[in-house]
Image (cartoon, rainbow, N blue to C red):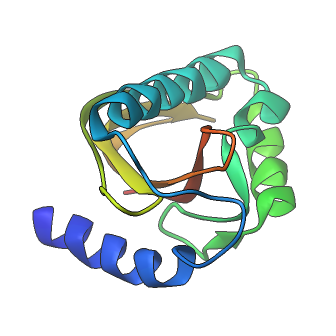
Amino acid sequence: MNRMVATLLVLVGGACAPQPGNTPVADPATDLAALRAADSAWQDASISRSADRMIASYAQNATADFGQEPIRGAAAIRNHWAQFFADTGGRLGWTMERAGVVPGASLGYTIGTYRGHYGTTDASGPYFAVWQRQEDGRWLVLIDTAR
């Protein structure tokens, strides 16, 4: 998993560092606390079963990859969550196990274990999210993966 984290951060870091709309991490301890809080708020949005609250945690250019074809862009990801929550039994939660920020960059990550139910299927496994710090200090999901 550590090699996967490093590889994703290198790939995403090159693409994200020069873009307007995000600022480098200046205080890793403060930013790590804000990142952990953002992941917790994201999970609260999932528990609320609201696609609108879920998408508020994603960057406009985010990608979600849950094992099928990657879902690209906030509108498509919102549509995914709207369909997921349309199933009255659809639910998703997770336990964040690790988080980190990249000093001098605008990136961070969270890693943990998800558990969910959709239709008649229960699922659980690892999740990994790459986050991007915005100019206003908010952390937004840039890449969301689960297997």
Closest to the observer: 23 or 54?
Answer: 23
Depth check, front residue: 115 or 109: 109
Q: Is residue 63 visible?
A: yes
Q: Residue at x 55, y 74 (%)?
A: 16
Residue 145 shows in this picture: no
- Left or right: where does residue 120 sit relative to residue 93? right
**Which residue shows up at 84% across the image and 33% down it?**
52
Residue 55 appears left or right of 122: right
Determine whether 21 is above or below 94 in the image. Answer: below
Q: Position of residue 108 (x, y in %)?
A: 38, 52
Q: Quadrant of the N terminus?
A: bottom left
Q: Position of residue 124 (x, y in %)?
A: 34, 39
Residue 123 in the figure: left or right of residue 96: right
Nearest the viewer among 123 and 56 is: 56
Where, by quadrant of the figure, is residue 59 drawn? Answer: bottom right
Residue lying at the far left of the rendered structure: 2
Where residue 69 sits, quadrant-wise, is bottom right
Above or below, comparing residue 126 to residue 2 in the picture: above
* Residue at the spot 40% in from the left edge and 36% down from the top edge: 31
Q: Image quadrant for the C terminus?
A: bottom left
Measuring from the top left, give residue 63's x and y in whole percent.
62, 67
Q: Residue at 39% of width from left, 83% of height from top?
A: 11
Q: Find residue 97 and report its image quarter.
A: top left
The number of numbered discs placed on residues in the rendered structure image is: 0
Q: Is residue 88 above or below residue 138?
A: above
Q: Position of residue 29 (x, y in %)?
A: 28, 32
Q: Is residue 56 above or below residue 50?
A: below
